[in-house]
Image (cartoon, rainbow, N blue to C red):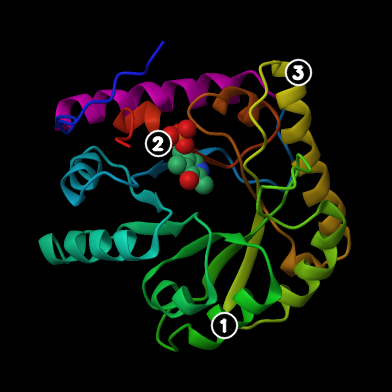
Amino acid sequence: MPSQISTTLPSPDKLQEARAKVLVRIAAAEASRPAFEGIAAPALLAVSKTFPAESVLALARAGQRDFGENYVQEGLDKLLACRAFDPDLKLCWHFVGPLQSNKTRLVAEHFDWVHSIDRLKIAQRLNDQRPEGMPALQVCIQVNISGESTKSGVQPAEVAGLAQAISGLGRLKLRGLMAIPERLDHPAKQSEAFAALRACLETTNLGLSPEKQMDQLSMGMSADLELAVAQGASWLRVGTAIFGHRAG
Ligand SMILES: *Cc1c(COP(=O)(O)O)cnc(C)c1O
C-alpha cells in the first residue's frame, strides 16, 4: 500500500494535538515501567527535519522546547529563523544526523546537543570550535547496536574507549548513548536492541568517574517509542507521529 504523502503543511492545531498524543503515549509507557537509576526521565525531542520554522513555532507555543534536525544547513536556517522571529524564545536544538568534519563548526556554534558522535575526530573538532561564551556542547555517542554494516555508529566494544576520550574534552559534556536500531517486526527483538543500549551505557559508566557518568539514552522513534521507554529511553526522537509523513 503506498503511503499518503501530504504536500500541505500540518496546521498548528493538528501539530499541537499530535504532540499531545505523543506525550500521552510516553507518559503511559513511563507509568508501566520500573525506574532506571541514573537515567533521566523520558522527554520528547520533536524531529522537525523537512518541516519549516512555522511548524516549530506552532509547537513551541504549545510548550515544546526541544527540536531535532539531521541536516546542518537546514537546521541552521530554521533555528536562525526561529530566533529572528522571537529572540526571547529559548529553544533547545539537537543535531541528530550524520556529521561530516567540514560541518562541525556550524554545529558547534549554533546547536545545544549532538546525538550522533561516531568518532573522536568529530568530537575534537566540536570541542575546539565551541565558542567560549557558550555552555558546553551536550553530546551522545551513536552506537551501532544492531550490528548492521550499513548503519553509522561505533561498535559497542568501542564505546568505552571513545567515552573516556570525549570525557576529557572540556568544551563538551558527554551525556549518553544514541541508537537507531534496525526496524524489526518482532517487538521482543526490538526491545532487545534497546535493552542492549542501556546495558552498554551501564557498562561504560563503570569506567567513568561519578561526575562524568552518562544519564541519557536517545532511542525510540514514532513507531517504537513505547518499547524504548520500557527499556529506559530518555530522549524520544519523534518526527512522523507529530508532523506527519515527510515528502520525498
Ligand atoms: C528522522 C529521524 C527521527 C524521527 O523518525 P520518525 O520515524 O519520523 O519518528 C529520529 N531520529 C533520527 C536520527 C532521524 O533522522
Q: Is residue 69 above or below residue 126?
A: above
Describe the element under mark 3 as helix, strand or loop: helix
Quadrant in which the C terminus is drawn: top left
Residue at position x 43%, y 71% from top? 107
Rendered image quadrant of residue 205: bottom right
Quadrant in which the N terminus is drawn: top left
Q: Is residue 240 above or below residue 4?
A: below
Work out whether mark 2 precedes mark 3 in sequence or the reverse, and give the earlier one: 3
- The residue under label 1 is 125
* Residue 88 visible in this rendered orientation of the protein: no
- The residue under label 2 is 239
Mark 2 C-beta closer than 8 Å to ligand 1:
yes
Work out whether mark 2 precedes mark 1 in sequence or the reverse, and give the earlier one: 1
Mark 3 C-beta closer than 8 Å to ligand 1:
no
Describe the element under mark 2 as helix, strand or loop: loop
Mark 1 C-beta closer than 8 Å to ligand 1:
no
Q: CA distance from mark 1 to mark 3?
A: 39 Å
Q: Is residue 17 above or below residue 103?
A: above
- The residue under label 3 is 188
Asked whether residue 25 is drawn in magenta, I would say yes
Rendered image quadrant of residue 70: bottom left
Name the residue type under label 3: Ala
Residue segment shown in magenta? 12-33
Name the residue type under label 2: Gly
